[in-house]
Image (cartoon, helix red, strand yellow):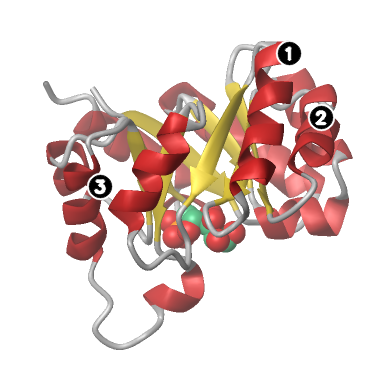
């Protein structure tokens, strides 16, 4: 079974809470997107965790430096997982992992912008992260010739626990699951859907196929 992570790339706390309410029955992980946290501040993490204490709350900080400090800020606000960039120094990842271990939480390394994703994934795994995210960001997805398949092949080759993010939708989630991803991250295909609850339910159904 592949877990389903909704990436909430909306810009205000009330809208994020409304979306989370609609999709919570179908998702395992609620991600507060980087633009949302930058717009609303870390309090959005507390607001969501308070409403959904049983869900894994992921603060998509995309930390590039001061790993221990930034991770602690988000964990103390209620996050269960935080992201650190794979392009950051190993010491930044290690600092965040140290705080995660202290508090019983987890770190996800986001491979956005990393050229050799499989190799960096193995390095991040050795630093003690929960899993690595094979990620093509919104800007990369908009470029001509973008293909999710490249990400999936790299993820499958890495040999470590991984998630996949990059415009995953109901037609591609089967391939994400088949590649062996532990987590499928879905943003626009849920928050941009006419019926986000139905979209999340359909994705969930595909994600849990044995
Ligand atoms: O992390 C993300 C991106 O950098 C903007 O914050 C997205 O949440 C991630 O790419 C998943 O969203 P979709 O690609 O729209 O599925």
Q: Position of residue 158 (x, y in %)?
A: 24, 43
Tag 2 or tag 1, which sits nearer the N-term?
2
Indicate which disc, 3 or 1, sits on the residue closer to the N terminus. 1
Q: Residue at x 86, y 52 (%)?
A: 40
Q: Residues within 10 Å of mark 2 (few under 14, many from 20)?
A: many
Q: Which residue is mark 2?
A: 72
Residue at x-position 30% and y-position 88%? 144
User: Is residue 71 or residue 34 the one in the foreground?
Assistant: 71
Do the CB atoms of the residues marked 3 and 1 lie less than 8 Å apart? no
* CB contact under 8 Å: marks 1 and 2: yes
> What residue is shown at x 69% (from left), y 56% (from top)?
64
Image coordinates of residue 186 in percent, x first then y, are 42, 48
The residue tagged 3 is: 155
**In the drawing, does residue 104 fall left or right of residue 145?**
right
Give how far across and how far down residue 190 sits, in percent. Answer: 45, 50
In this view, the residue in front, 135 or 33, is 135
Secondary element type, mark 1: helix
Can residue 60 be seen here? The reply is: no
Label 1 within 8 A of ligand 1 by Cβ = no
Inter-mark Cα distance, 3 to 1: 28 Å
At x 62% / y 46%, what residue is drawn? 84
Q: Is residue 121 left or right of residue 137?
A: left
163 to the left or right of 20: left
């Amino acid at each position: 079974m592949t877990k389903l992570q909704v990436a909430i790339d909306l810009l205000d706390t009330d809208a994020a809470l409304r979306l989370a309410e609609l999709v919570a029955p179908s998702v395992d992980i609620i991600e507060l997107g980087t633009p949302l946290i930058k717009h609303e501040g870390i309090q959005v993490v507390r607001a969501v965790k308070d409403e959904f204490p049983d869900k894994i709350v992921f603060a998509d900080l995309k930390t590039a430096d001061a790993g221990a400090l930034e991770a602690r800020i988000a964990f103390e606000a209620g996050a269960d997982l935080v992201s650190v960039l794979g392009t950051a120094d190993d010491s930044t990842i290690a600092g965040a992992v140290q705080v995660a271990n202290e508090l019983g939480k987890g770190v996800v390394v986001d491979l956005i912008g990393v050229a050799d994703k499989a190799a960096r994934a193995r390095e991040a795994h050795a630093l003690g992260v929960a899993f690595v995210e094979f990620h093509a960001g919104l800007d990369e997805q908009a470029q001509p010739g973008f293909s999710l398949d490249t990400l999936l092949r790299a993820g499958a080759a890495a040999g470590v626990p991984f998630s996949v993010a990059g415009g995953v939708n109901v037609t591609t989630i089967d391939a994400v699951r088949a590649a062996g991803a532990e987590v499928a991250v879905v943003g626009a295909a849920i928050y941009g859907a006419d019926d986000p609850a139905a979209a999340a339910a359909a994705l969930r159904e595909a994600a849990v196929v044995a």
